[in-house]
Image: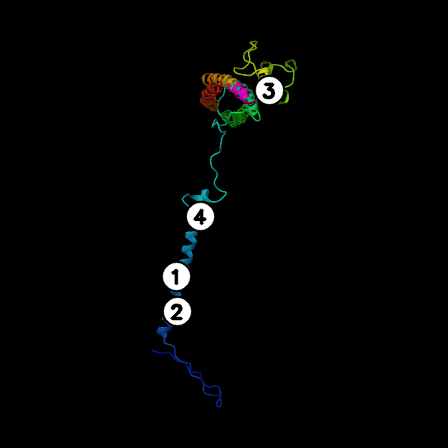
């Protein structure tokens, strides 16, 4: 069926209105339906793309954790994995930190003397390893003491490379430094600590002589640290301090074994 419309003339002399071609109603309906369907398909496709983009930004994770800058991993600790000293502590924990800090600092001084003096490649590598391991442990233990409200110990003397020409009377022994002695009135230095003369002799050595002296002195130094760490494990209360003590025992015992082999090789 066709719909038609004729415009009636307004005046007698007006021209006859042009007949508008009839449009099939069914065809018009079908055209509108197709346009509506295409529009709906386009809307669905756009929505699917939007959802896909949102989903892909999440990756295999969930929520904000996959958004750049939004993921916050667990806080890292020192290389020793000993943590920040949280939890209860006792006098043995405080003494361990206050004594091991200058003990480690002297080991760093000894290790830094290897540059320009050591000839053996294994000794050079060992000195670097000692520095990389013990420097972060010093920072960790200083953090404990600050958190516990306890004073930091005095640092060892400056590197003997800068004062190797000084006379023995120009400086006191390591055992006379604040925080370097055990007990009350015993006057004994911490185990394994080098005297000023030991440090001057090491600074004056070169080549194979330095390699041998360094290894021999560091063996004794490590043995002292191991004894201190065992004391902490026995008498300490803080879990982080006891964990670092365990790391010291394991690492330095392994290095003692290595240095014994170096000394035997350099004879």
Give the mark nearest the N terminus, 2 or 3.
2
Crowdedness near tag 1: few (<14), some (14–19) or many (≥20) residues, C-alpha within 10 Å = few
* Residue at the disc numbered 1: 41
* Image spot of residue 102 (x, y percent): 56, 20
* Left or right of residue 120: residue 51: left
Q: Are marks 2 and 3 in contact (CB under 8 Å)?
A: no
Q: Are marks 4 and 2 in contact (CB under 8 Å)?
A: no
Crowdedness near tag 4: few (<14), some (14–19) or many (≥20) residues, C-alpha within 10 Å = some
SS for tag 2? helix
What is the number of the mark on residue 57? Answer: 4
Q: Residue furthest left?
A: 1
* Image spot of residue 153 (x, y percent): 58, 20
Give the mark nearest the N terminus, 1 or 4.
1
Give the mark nearest the N terminus, 2 or 1.
2
* Residue at the disc numbered 2: 32
SS for tag 4? helix
The quarter of the picture where the N terminus appears is: bottom left
Q: Is residue 142 or residue 90 the one in the foreground?
A: 142
* Residue at the disc numbered 3: 204
Between marks 4 and 3 in the image, the one whose residue lies nearer the viewer: 3
Between marks 4 and 2 in the image, the one whose residue lies nearer the viewer: 4
Does 151 lie within the magenta span? no
SS for tag 1? helix
Between marks 2 and 3 in the image, the one whose residue lies nearer the viewer: 3
Give the mark nearest the N terminus, 1 or 3.
1
What is the number of the mark on residue 127? Answer: none
Which portion, as a residue range, is magenta? 206-215
How far apart, in angstroms, are the residues tagged by discs 1 and 4? 25 Å
How far apart, in angstroms, are the residues tagged by discs 2 and 3? 99 Å
């Amino acid at each position: 069926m066709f719909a038609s419309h004729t415009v009636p003339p307004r005046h007698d002399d007006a021209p006859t209105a042009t007949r508008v071609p009839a449009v099939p109603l069914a065809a018009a309906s079908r055209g509108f339906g197709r346009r509506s369907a295409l529009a709906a398909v386009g809307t669905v496709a756009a929505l699917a793309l939007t959802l896909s983009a949102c989903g892909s930004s999440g990756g295999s994770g969930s929520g904000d954790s996959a958004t750049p800058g939004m993921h916050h991993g667990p806080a890292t600790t020192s290389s020793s994995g000993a943590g920040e000293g949280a939890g209860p502590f006792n006098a043995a924990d405080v003494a361990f930190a206050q004594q091991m800090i200058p003990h480690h600092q002297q080991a760093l001084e000894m290790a830094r003397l290897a540059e320009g003096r050591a000839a053996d490649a294994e000794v050079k590598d060992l000195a670097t390893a000692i520095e990389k391991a013990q420097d972060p442990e010093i920072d960790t233990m200083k953090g404990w003491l600050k958190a516990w409200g306890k004073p930091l110990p005095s640092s060892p003397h400056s590197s003997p490379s800068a004062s190797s020409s000084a006379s023995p009377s120009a400086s006191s022994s390591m055992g006379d430094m604040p925080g370097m002695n055990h007990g009350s009135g015993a006057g004994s230095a911490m185990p394994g600590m080098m005297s000023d003369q030991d440090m001057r002799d090491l600074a004056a050595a070169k080549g194979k002589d330095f390699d041998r002296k360094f290894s021999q002195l560091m063996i004794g130094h490590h043995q002292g640290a191991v004894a201190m760490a065992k004391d902490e494990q026995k008498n300490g209360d803080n879990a982080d301090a006891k964990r670092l003590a365990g790391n010291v025992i394991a690492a330095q015992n392994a290095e003692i074994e290595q240095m014994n082999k170096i000394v035997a090789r350099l004879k």
